[in-house]
Image: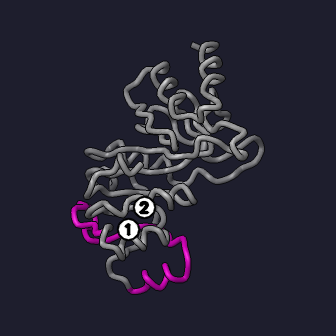
């Protein structure tokens, strides 16, 4: 994911282990901006290191913008009376019209599973509801409207201790739709989806699936294309 993010870009990052890992990987970047739903300890560290400066962000320049603080007491103390951090309601932070005015806005979110055509499920596995829809689609829309923006979904290639692929032929629940996602990333690489045919999308996603599941996914794909 870090390879997709240029210096001075503005980022929105979701929550969780994958999100924190992505933020930690950005320590070599310069002048990043933040306009996000939540602010984490990992982002706080980048602010302390001078990586997040918001110096070129067109909306609220010089300010780290979010709706919630999601972290430790240290994070809350860091943000208390910190004039470089501003919290706003979701009708500002998640508003695609606002986000469209931020160039190079990168929406970086995770998923539970992804279909071979790029449909994103970030909410439910079987009958088990893992999360609400949240702001994922809002930020993805904003990235699509941003000049130079990118919508990125990052997830591990497997679940259940490596026994199940998170890249599947179909997903039963759809949080974000395939036409809005630019990139899907796993530990095996980057699948660039935007502008590709269904067949091209599927091949790109199979290439970043865990090697143990690529043959089965290819065979299943033959049955539907």
Q: At which x and y percent is residue 98?
A: 33, 56
What's the magenta region?
Answer: 53-81
User: Label 1 neighbourhood size at 10 Å, few (<14), some (14-19), many (20+)?
Assistant: many
Asked whether, in this view, residue 121 is left or right of residue 91, the answer is right
Which residue is outermost to the right?
127
Q: Secondary structure at mark 2?
A: loop
Residue on which disc 2 sits = 36
Q: CA distance from mark 2 to mark 1?
A: 6 Å
Q: Are marks 2 and 1 in contact (CB under 8 Å)?
A: yes
Position of 201 relative to 70 (above/below):
above
Position of 95 relative to 61 (above/below):
above
Asked whether, in this view, residue 162 is left or right of residue 109, the answer is right
Q: At which x and y percent is residue 146?
A: 30, 47
Q: Quadrant of the C terminus?
A: top right
In the foreground, 120 or 163: 163
Q: At which x and y percent is residue 111?
A: 57, 46
Q: Check if residue 74 falls in the magenta segment.
A: yes
Looking at the image, which residue is at 69% across and 52% down? 130
Asked whether, in this view, residue 5 is left or right of residue 121, the answer is left
Q: Secondary structure at mark 1?
A: strand
Looking at the image, which residue is at 56% across and 28% down? 116
Q: At which x and y percent is residue 18?
A: 54, 55
Which corner quadrant of the image does residue 119 belong to?
A: top right
User: Label 2 neighbourhood size at 10 Å, few (<14), some (14-19), many (20+)?
Assistant: many
Residue on which disc 1 sits = 65
Looking at the image, which residue is at 42% across and 73% down? 44
Which corner quadrant of the image does residue 191 belong to?
A: top left
Which residue is outermost to the front?
211
């Amino acid at each position: 994911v870090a390879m997709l993010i240029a210096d001075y870009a503005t980022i929105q990052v979701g929550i969780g282990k994958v999100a924190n890992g992505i933020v930690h990987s950005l320590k070599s970047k310069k002048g990043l901006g933040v306009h996000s739903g939540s602010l984490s300890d990992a982002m706080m560290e980048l602010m302390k290191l001078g990586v997040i400066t918001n110096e070129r962000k067109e909306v609220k320049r010089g300010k780290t913008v979010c709706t919630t603080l999601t972290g430790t007491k240290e994070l809350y103390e860091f943000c208390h009376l910190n004039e470089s951090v501003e919290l706003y309601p979701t009708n500002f932070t998640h508003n695609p019209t606002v986000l469209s005015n931020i160039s190079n806005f990168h929406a970086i979110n995770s998923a539970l599973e992804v279909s071979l055509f790029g449909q994103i499920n970030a909410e439910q596995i079987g009958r088990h509801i893992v999360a609400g829809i949240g702001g994922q689609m809002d930020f993805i829309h904003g990235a699509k409207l941003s000049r130079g923006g990118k919508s990125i979904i990052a997830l591990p290639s497997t679940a259940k201790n490596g026994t199940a692929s998170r890249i599947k032929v179909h997903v039963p629940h759809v949080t974000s739709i395939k036409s809005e996602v630019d990139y899907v990333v796993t530990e095996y690489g980057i699948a660039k989806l935007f502008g590709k045919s269904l067949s091209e999308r599927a091949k790109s996603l199979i290439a970043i699936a865990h090697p143990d599941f690529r043959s089965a996914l290819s065979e299943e794909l033959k049955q539907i294309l």
